[in-house]
Image (cartoon, rainbow, N blue to C red):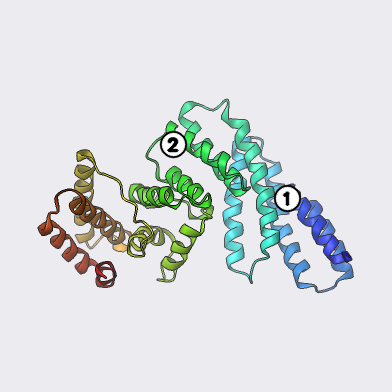
Amino acid sequence: MENSKDGSIRKALISLQNGDPMTAKSIICAAMVIHLGDSRLVTIEAYCCFWCDSFEQCSAIANPYEKGEHLLVDWKDFIDYLKNHDTPDEETVNAIQRGVFSIALECFEKTLESAKASYKAEILRKIGICYKKIGDYEKAMNCLIDSNKHKPFQAEILAELADCYALCGNDKNAKALFREAFYLDSKKVELFFLDSELIRSLIAATEKKGYKGEELKAWIPVYGVIYGVFDIKREMEAKDISKLRQDIYALEVKSKNPSNDTQTFVPILIYKYFWLIDYCQMYNDNTDLIEQTLLKIKILDLSVYNLYKC
């Protein structure tokens, strides 16, 4: 038989799933009067307070797109909040996630029909994120595919699409798209919204190396190659290799300038070198160029070179 505390938590979680943290907080506060000092109730009440503040601010925003954006930004802040506290209450976090992204989804869908063509790709991407976060991966994937049609070759769109493929068990497509997304622009990949074990485990492994922020994003694809995550490779056309060589040259120039911050240049350059080696191996087996490129990697980072050569 369900006791009063469990019943209160169940009712509060339903309210959170419905995007109503105020009601959830009232239920939990009432339960705390009876169950003084209960650690789980204290945790849930703290989560409710966070989202009560967020929803109060949200209610003052008239524009639905801006309202949806507000919720997404606050979700990022909430994830940071969880990292700085004890082990999260996963059941409550999942309930909050469903509520927050359901409401954000409504906000973004309201803006889609009347949006200018130039904005539709980004709105569709955010709709895709919302569907993904509430567990409807098929709808999420369709939205992200549509987003990619409106604006192809965008790192942030491809990364979300890759995440959907991984969540649906299609690791081959996921690996190929993650590899492409980080190649296009690692800075644009939003790690906060990626959920699949495929990418989360790679992010965690790279974080253990001590990297954070933009530097972390830049190193993720390097270790993606080293750990065999980014092992699905596409064919490269002549224009692709020409662009790759131009990018490498520009990065080499920047990395030699002592006034430039090499924290992100180095991993981005190493990842480009990996692509150049792949190209040589796939097309013309230019062993001299491969050896020259490996030497450059060795000079940049000996530990990465040793791991890559293993």
Q: Is residue 241 left or right of residue 307?
A: left
Spatial separation of the CA atoms under disc 1 and disc 2: 30 Å
The residue beneath circle 2 is 148
- Residue 82 in the image: state x and y as whole percent: 61, 64
Q: Regarding mark 2 in the picture, which secondary structure is present there?
A: helix
Q: Position of residue 211 (x, y in %)?
A: 41, 67
Q: Residue at the spot x=85%, y=61% of the render?
A: 7
Q: Residue at x 35, y 48 (%)?
A: 180
Q: Are marks 1 and 2 in contact (CB under 8 Å)?
A: no
Q: Residues within 10 Å of mark 2 (few under 14, many from 20)?
A: many
Quarter the C terminus occupies = bottom left
> Which residue is at a point 44% across and 45% down the rendered structure image?
156
Which residue is disc 1 drawn over?
A: 17
| Residue drawn where x is 43% and y is 44% of the image | 158
Q: Residue furthest left?
A: 288
- The part of the image, by quadrant, that contains residue 301 is bottom left
Q: Position of residue 109 (x, y in %)?
A: 61, 34
Left or right: 255, with 119 as reference point? left
Residue in front for this viewpoint, 72 or 176: 176
Residue 209 in the image, given as x and y percentages of width and height: 40, 71
Specify the quadrant that holds the N terminus: bottom right
In this rendering, would 184 be left or right of 110?
left
Dot 1 lies on which element?
A: helix
Label drawn at residue 103: none
Give the quadrant of residue 261.
bottom left
Along the horizontal axis of the image, is 44 left or right of 233?
right
Q: Nearer the viewer, residue 68 or 91?
A: 91
Label 1 crowd (10 A; few <14 / some 14-19 / many >=20) = many
Q: Amino acid at mark 1?
A: Gln
Tell me the quarter of the picture where residue 296 sits: bottom left
Which residue type does callout 2 highlight? Answer: Asn
N-term mark: 1 or 2: 1
